[in-house]
Image (tube, helix red, strand yellow):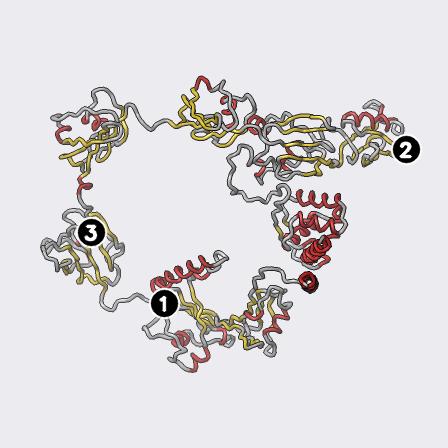
Amino acid sequence: MNYIKLTLFTLLFSLFSQQITSQNINDINRIDNMTDQQVALYWKKAQEKGLTIDQLEIAAKAKGISDAQILKLKQRIANLNTATFQGEDTTDNQANQEGFFQEKQDSFGLDGTEKKNVKKSDLFGFDFFSNPNISFTPNLNLATPESYQLGPGDEVLIDVWGAAENNYTKKIGLDGAIRIPNVGPVYVSGLSIADAKAKIKTYLKKIYGGIGASSSSYNKVNVDISLANVRTVQVNIIGEVKVPGTYSLSALSSVLNALYAAGGPTSNGTFREIKIFRDGNLLSTFDIYNYLTEGDEKGNVSLRDQDVVIVEPYQNRVTVEGEAKRPGLYEVKEGETLQDLMAYFGGFTSDAYKEMVTLERVNKGQKEISEVPLAQQSSFKLKDGDKLTIGKIINRFQNRVSIAGAVYRPGNFELVKGITVGNLIEKAGGVKEDAFLDRGIIYRTLDEVNQEIVPFSVKDVLQNTENILLKREDSVRVFSVNELKEEYTVSINGAVNKPQTIPFIENMQVEDLIAISGGFKEGADVSSISISRRANDGTFKTVSKNIQLATSNNLEVKNNDVVYLKPFDRVSVRYIKGFTTQKSVSVEGEANYPGTYAIENKEDRISDLLKKAGGLSPYAYIKGATLFRKNNTNESEGQNDALKAITKKIDTLSTVKGATSDLIEKKEDFQIGIDLAKIMAHKGSKYDLVLEKGDRLVIPSVKQTVQVQGEVLSPSIVRYDKSKSLKDYVNNAGGFSEKARRGKAYVVYANGDIKSTKRFLFFKSYPKLEPGALILVPNKTVARDPLTAQEVIGITTSLATLGVLINTLVK
């Protein structure tokens, strides 16, 4: 039975290995020589094949790759920053330039490409390590701290100038020494920068006697020692972090650098007591909350090789809700009080009720509620699971009255002893001219919930014949006359300069409304003006009453036959019968007299326009002539609405959002393909279109080229050759690309006509080409990379072997 299990496992692993045939596992052995671009490309191809980092590790171990090389690969992937590299070469020998790649590496640490609109966590401090705009990579451009301790791998730069000049760049070896010619080994490992400088200068005196000379001496030799390159250290980050493991970090890295590289603590990790162990002993603890609130870096020590950073699970957490400046979930240490917690959530908001905080606490298997007064907040100790709710002050005034409506200064006012409605109206600046004086009302609160209305006469209040004392939260309302009736308007349309609807005014005449609306337009028929008026004759049949009248162009004042407008009248000014404005069309390009021409009658055609333009010039390309027509918004509005509705339904069902958004793009001009040769030969025929306002007839010059665009290797312009086919022109542009959809190639001719490739069975018929044509090759969407021949053979062989094995087991 064990033999059968082993055989099945071998077959399944064989299937798995076929999946990654295109991923060269042996490349991991040369990880030290790979650039960041090559590492990013390697990881990208692995992800495209559906592989995770764990699957890569299994495959690498099966190939005999060492654990050290696998760890280096993980670290290189984790340390990738914004993986964006330029280039378009896709050949094998230039794979490291495969370009414009931006991939999020979400398996190890952060790479700076995370989304900025990620949902924020309630846990205080958690989002700090998820912010892609923050990086804790040590700044290597700053001067090395004098306390920095040198070690194997650091590179030291020694400059000598003055009476003697030289420079040395020496790397500290595994024995802890640098070797200077004619000096011998100088052991500096474990020394600070300051101590190492003094020691190296002492050794250099053996060959540069002028180092000890005075500054004024002619044989003075100066020496400067600095750190050229910083070594890397291996730091173990374990416990409740997002990506635990062993990290290769700069020797200048601190605890914060290490935590950020590992993604920060998880939702179960502590933020208050990060422990750092060195040589098996606890070196320090780091409190992230103190750093975030006070900038305190106590415990944020510089890391050394083989240091261990441990993030243990949290001990106590409390929830803060309500009117806190930063409500959320907070970790507290043993013995911390509510006063300590306030420093973390930022204190109370301006609307907070500070006198009392509500506390929910678990007590012997159930919850209880208690209240923490303001006096006890500094000594009240918190426990795990506590929930604090900070209430809001009530929206209630002790001495407020208000007034609204037809007064000059409506708003809230102070309730003073003995204030009456008349006093409040006086404070509000008095009533307006349009105030309704017969009735006003007071909204009065009875029992904090119910209200009553107290009516009063505004006229009596103003004449001091009635006085009503106000109470707390009373709201006075003075109505406007216009509020108590329907708004009266009149409107005008037709042949006036500003058709509009305006408020009705008493004694307004028709001529007044025309003058207010900018007067007559050219072509207005002043003898035919109609008024539509509401009918109030008490019958159900009559809808409105129509009045016809005439006036003069100068809108002179009449003393008789005056018509006064009434509310809701609609005035219509007609145009003179048959009146229309001039309509223009134009000819552009190779005509004898190109320019703009007026349409003489509604039956003018393209041939008539060409005749007015003096015919074609000797250089006109007749086959390329085209007509541009303006989009008539009014006529196509219904079609556009229907198209939008259909497009919305298509987008709802489509898996690719916005796939049909181009369908509803509003175009100003439409290009109409015409046959100018047939138009000239058969004037007035169906080919000879009737002109419309704004039409543009464009006649290009003789064309000698064909343009090739789309999915070809080198989009270009090719010289026209009558003997060439569409495929010949595509081949002149480098041929079809891998993404080309050959069967859907189409041609846009110079006159705007479009012809596509036709297909019958296995045969394709490409459109014929004309000078000035544009060949467009669309792309195809590939859901997944096709299997290579090696993959197909491997999978087929494995399945066949598996079938034989199962058949044997069954028998």
> Is 269 drawn above or below residue 704 in the view shown?
above
Which residue occupies the foreground of this view, 459 or 271? 271
| Apparent side of residue 729 relative to residue 402 in the rendered image (left or right) | right
Of callouts 3 and 2, which one flags the residue occurring earlier in the amino acid sequence?
2
Q: Amino acid at mark 2?
A: Asn
Q: CA distance from mark 1 to mark 2?
A: 96 Å
Which residue is identified by label 1?
Answer: 693
Report which quarter residue 737 is drawn in: bottom right
* Circles 1 and 2: CB atoms closer than 8 Å: no
In percent of width and height, residue 288 lies at 59, 29
Which residue occupies the foreground of this view, 139 or 760? 760
Asked which secondary structure carries label 2, the reply is loop
Which residue is identified by label 3?
Answer: 490
The outermost residue toward the bottom is 681
Q: Residues within 10 Å of mark 1 (few under 14, many from 20)?
A: some
In percent of width and height, residue 799 lies at 67, 62
Q: Amino acid at mark 1?
A: Lys
Which residue occupies the foreground of this view, 640 or 750? 640
Of callouts 3 and 1, which one flags the residue occurring earlier in the amino acid sequence?
3
Determine the residue positioned at 22% across, 65% down: 576
* Circle on res. 182: 2
Q: Residues within 10 Å of mark 2 (few under 14, many from 20)?
A: few
